[in-house]
Image (cartoon, grey):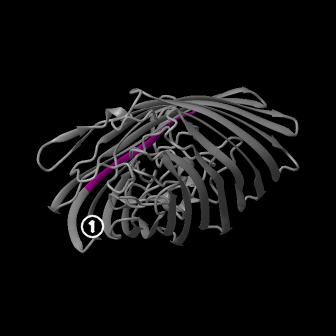
Amino acid sequence: MIPTSLLAGRFFRQRMPATLLLATAVLAQPWPSFAQSPDMALPDTPATTNPSAPGAGASPLRGGMLQEAPLEDSQADDLNQLIDGAQNPVETGIDTGDEANRRDDGSGIRLGTFTLRPTINQSINSETTKSGGIKTTRSYLATTANGTLTSDWGRHQLTVSGEGTYERNVSGRGSTDPEGRLDADLRLDLSGNTTGHITGGYAFEREDTGDPNAVSGATTQAGVNRYTGGASLERDFGVLRGTATLAATRTTYGTARFADGSSLSLSDRDRTAVEGRVRLGYELSPALIPFIEASLGRAVYDARRDASGYERSSISYGGRGGLQFDLSEKLRGELGIGYATVDYEDSRLAALNALTLDGTIFWSPHRGTDVDLGLRTTLQDAATAGASGWSEYLLTAGLSHQILNNLTGRLTASATRRDFPSATDETDWQAGAGLIWSVNRYFDATANVGYEHTANAGGADSNLWRVGLGLSLKR
C-alpha cells in the first residue's frame, strides 16, 4: 500500500491536491511540488527541501483540470520541516504572459481595497484502476472552486487564497475524496531592506488509500485536518541576506470506516509540531547567491504512545547548502544539498537519516513556452508498529506551451521513490497531458488525460487511467 515520489508530484489525487489557480494561467505557470503522500498530516513539507519547488508536486489530474500542486498541498508527514515558502525566494513566474496581462486588464471583482479573482470548474471524468487482476471503473462529476483575494495597499499586502473540490459518482464504484484549503499571507514591508510575513491556513483531505499509513481494508480512509501558522523575517545586510522563520502545525485525524459498518479512530496520530529555520546567503553577484541553512523542529503527539505502544514524538534537525541563481528573466532557480535527521523518543524506533536533494529550475526558451523542474526530499513518519518512517524523493517536470492565442497545452511527468529502512523500496510514475481553450475572458474549456503506475512492495502493482472534460467560469 505504498506509492512513491521522484519526478512530478501526485498527479491524480492530491490529497490536498490543489487545483489550478486560474484556468487560463494554470498551464502557463510552474508548479510548486506534490506530491503527496496522502498522509498529509503535516508536520510536513519537505525536510530541508526548497519549499518553492515548482516541480514539487506535479499537477494532479482532478476534477477534469490540471491542477497546481504547491508544496504546501502536497505536504506529507514530514516531521523535520514545516516551513513553507522559499527563503530569499526567487520569482516563480517566467514569461507567464496571459496571467500577468490578466492582472492588469481589469479582471477580478473589486471589494474595497481588495481584488477577488475566482474560478469555478465543472467537469465530468472517467477513471479506471487495475490492481492485482481486479479492475474497477467509475465516472464522476467534480466541482472545483478556487480564488485569490489580494489587497491593493500602498504598503504591505494581504493575500488570501482558497480552493476546494467535491466529487460525486454517477456510475461505477470508487472513493470520492473531498478536499479544500484556505491560506493567508500578510506581508509587512518594515523597511527598504526588511520584510516580514505572518501566515496562517487550514486544509482538509482524506488520507489516500495508497499511502503507507493508510488503513488496510478500509472503504473510507480517515479525514485529515491541518492547521498552520507561522512568521518570518527577511533582511538584507549589504551582500548578505538573512532569513529567520518559525512555523507551527496542528494535525488531527478522523475515523476510518469498513464495509461491515465498523470504524477505527486514528486520533492516536494527532500531533502538534513546531520548526525554526535560519538561512544566510552571500551575494556574489545579483545573479548568484550561495547560501547555507539550518533547521530545528519538535513534534509532540497528543497520545504519549500510539495504538501499537510506541512513543512517536520526536526532535528533527537538518542543514543544507546550495546556490540560488537568476541568470536572466528566462532562467532562474535554486539547487541545494544537505542532510536531515529525525530522532524519536522511543528507543525502539531507529532515527531517520537522509541525504537531501532539493531544487527548482524555471526556464522559458521563448515567450509562450515554459519548462519547470523540481526535486525535493522529505522525511515522513510511519504508523506501523516497529517502523520509524521513510525518506521520499520526488522529481517533477512540466512543459507548457501556448499553441494558439487562446489554446494552451501542458505535459507533465513525475517519479516518486520511497526508501524504507527495513522494507522494499517503492516507486510511483505519473504522466499527464492537458489542454485549456480560452473561449473568452470568462470561460475556459479544459481537457485532460493522465496515467499512474505504482510498483508496490509486497503487493500487486497498480495502474490508473483518468480522462476528463470540463468548463471553467472565471472572473
Residue bearing the label numbered 1: 127
The front one of 429 and 182 is: 429
Disc 1 residue type (three-letter) = Glu
**Magenta segment includes 146:** yes
Q: Position of residue 205 (x, y in %)?
A: 35, 44
Image x and y of residue 158, in percent: 55, 31
Q: In which image quadrant can residue 263 be found?
A: top left
Quadrant of residue 152 within the rendered picture = top right
Picture residue at 57% right of the left edge, 43% below the top: 351
Most common secondary structure along the magenta stretch: strand
Relative to 166, is 299 above or below?
above
Q: Secondary structure at mark 1?
A: strand
Q: Residue at x 42, y 50 (%)?
A: 18
Say whether residue 117 is visible: no
| Residue that appears at 41% across and 69% down | 455
Q: Is residue 471 magenta?
A: no
Q: Position of residue 346 (x, y in %)?
A: 49, 34
Q: Quadrant of the N terminus?
A: bottom left
Residue 335, position as x, y percentages in the image: 71, 55
Q: Residue furthest front?
A: 348
Front residue (pair 91, 423): 423
Q: Is residue 147 above or below residue 199?
A: below
Specify start and end residues of the magenta stretch as a single range: 142-153
| Horizontal relation, residue 445 to residue 265: left or right | right
Residue 281 visible from this viewpoint: yes
